[in-house]
Image (spheres, rainbow, N blue to C red):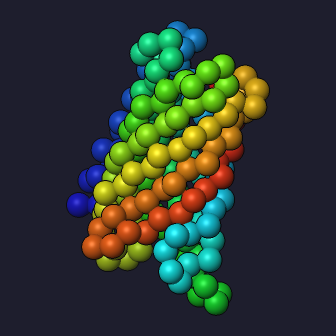
Amino acid sequence: MKKLILAIGIVAFSTAAAQAQDASKSTTLSIAANVGIPTTTGLSLAYGGDLQADFGVAPTTKITASAGYEAYSVKGGGSSSGIIPLLGGVKFNLGDKAYAHGQLGYGVSTAKGGSGSFAYAPSLGYYLSRNVDASVKYLAFSNHGTLGSVNLRVAYNF
């Protein structure tokens, strides 16, 4: 089941990326890195990256699709666990450079025998330049409990 969901996510994101290359200037692709503090007990660090496509649907609104990888380090030097978040969302401009972004989706565990989970990620961001933006993002996965983190995300926009 996980492989099927991952395959669907990859196909959906690839299709979105291919369409973005032919779209107007209101469509952007970005690559981002993030680091954060887990809100779940027993974890010490969250880090990862993602690819995101933003499709302009109105002057101040974009529909987004993203896929990435998020790792969580266990306190005391234990192993880390990973999740592949597949998210869709809406981004609203709050002025010239600030924005609010809400995403929902599915997280696929990379652990052997791991399961999937409902994912959500509200964030507030700021365009530092035409090609660089930074945001503070709460990324959470819920499945019989919540695994979450508050992350600083820095992206380069193409």
User: Residue 111 occupies which quadrant of the picture?
Assistant: bottom left
For the point 40% across and 36% down, which residue is it? 89
Residue in the foreground of this view, choosing between 55 and 135: 135
Quadrant of the rendering where the N terminus is positioned: bottom left
Whether 93 is drawn above or below 134: the answer is above
Q: Please identify the residue farthest to the right as the structure is shown.
A: 129
x, y percentage for residue 27?
Answer: 53, 19
Whether 42 is drawn above or below 91: the answer is below
Residue in the foreground of this view, choosing between 95 and 127: 95
Whether 145 is drawn above or below 129: the answer is below
For the point 43% across and 69% down, which residue is it? 147
Quadrant of the rendering where the C terminus is positioned: top right
Whether 89 is drawn above or below 92: the answer is below
Residue in the foreground of this view, choosing between 82 and 154: 154
For the point 56% across and 69% down, which residue is it? 38
For the point 43% across and 59% down, which residue is it? 140
Number of callouts: 0
Q: Please identify the residue farthest to the left as the structure is shown.
A: 1
Left or right position of 142 against 80: left
x, y percentage for residue 98?
Answer: 63, 29
Left or right position of 67 against 9: right
x, y percentage for residue 92?
Answer: 49, 27
Residue in the foreground of this view, choosing between 152 and 53: 152
Q: Is residue 155 visible?
A: no
Q: Is residue 57 visible?
A: yes
Q: Please identify the residue farthest to the front as the structure is shown.
A: 95
